[in-house]
Each structure stands twice: as structure tokens, then as C-alpha cells.
Image: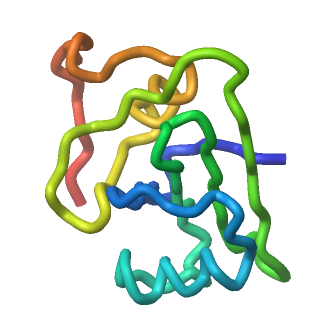
Amino acid sequence: MLLLTSKVQYYMCSTPIDIRKGFDGLYGLIQNHIKKDPLTGDIFIFINKNRTHIKMMYWDGDGFVIYYKRLEKGTYDLPKTTDPSKELKREELLLILEGIRLEICKKKKRFVLTK
């Protein structure tokens, strides 16, 4: 089961991918394109060129898990970025998955505990 918590980081690959990639192909993208360690437990997000398919991969302690979803209608709306990867907040990922445009949403100020 995929739990989206605020305790992990979320990284979205800003380059569209060949959605047929499996564990090894996505592992390579995480290391070489996103420049992160796939074994951290962070969630890595990949979307195809048409923005109709999404894959998320993470390490759950003893193996990799892939979450894969194909939209039957519509597309995913992605945040604008020029970086190879975009760090997302959990709330942003949930909005993307629900089909809500991030540019339209305004977040109100909230308390943030600094370490």
C-alpha cells in the first residue's frame, strides 16, 4: 500500500519518460537523472509524454515498490520547472493525482516548525 506522508521527500522527474520502464530503468533514472539515492525511502514520480500515465517508485525496506496509474480521461497537470527533478510537497502530489491545477491553488500561511 502506498502511504503519502509528510515524513518522506517526493521528487518528480521533470523529463517525460518511456512509461514501459520497469524497476531497473527507473532505478537508473533516479541515480543518473534525478541524482538521488533510490534506497532512501523517498518517493520518485515519473510521468509519460502525454501526461496520462504516472509511476511512483520507492524503497520500502526490503524491496522496491512501483505504483502505476493510467488515466482513462484527462491528463496530469505538472508544475513548471527547468530542473531535472522537482521536489514536491505531499499536498502538491495529492493535487496532481486528483487532477487539480497547482497554478490555481493558493496556500494559506501555516506554522512550520524549524529544526
Residue at point 66% right, 63% down?
57
Is residue 94 placed above or below 82 in the rendered structure? Answer: above
Is residue 62 shown above or below 73? below
In which quadrant is the C terminus drawn? bottom left
Q: Position of residue 14 (x, y in %)?
A: 33, 56
Rendered location of residue 53, percent (x, y): 62, 41
Residue depicted at 37% across the width and 75% down the height: 34
Q: Is residue 62 left or right of residue 83?
A: right
**Residue in the foreground of this view, choosing between 46 and 37:** 46
Q: Compare residues 75 and 10 and report the one nearer the observer.
A: 75
Q: Nearer the viewer, residue 18 or 41?
A: 18
- Residue 108 placement: quadrant: top left
In the image, what residue occupies the spot 23% across and 23% down? 110
Measuring from the top left, give residue 62's x and y in whole percent. Answer: 84, 82
In the displayed structure, 80 sits above or below 24; it is above
Q: Nearer the viewer, residue 88 or 61?
A: 88
| Residue at the (61%, 71%) spot, across then down | 41
**Could you tell me how many numbered marks the image carries?**
0
Picture layout, residue 88 above or below residue 38: above
Left or right of 11: which side holds 61? Answer: right
Q: Position of residue 98 (x, y in %)?
A: 56, 19
Q: How is the image coloured?
A: rainbow
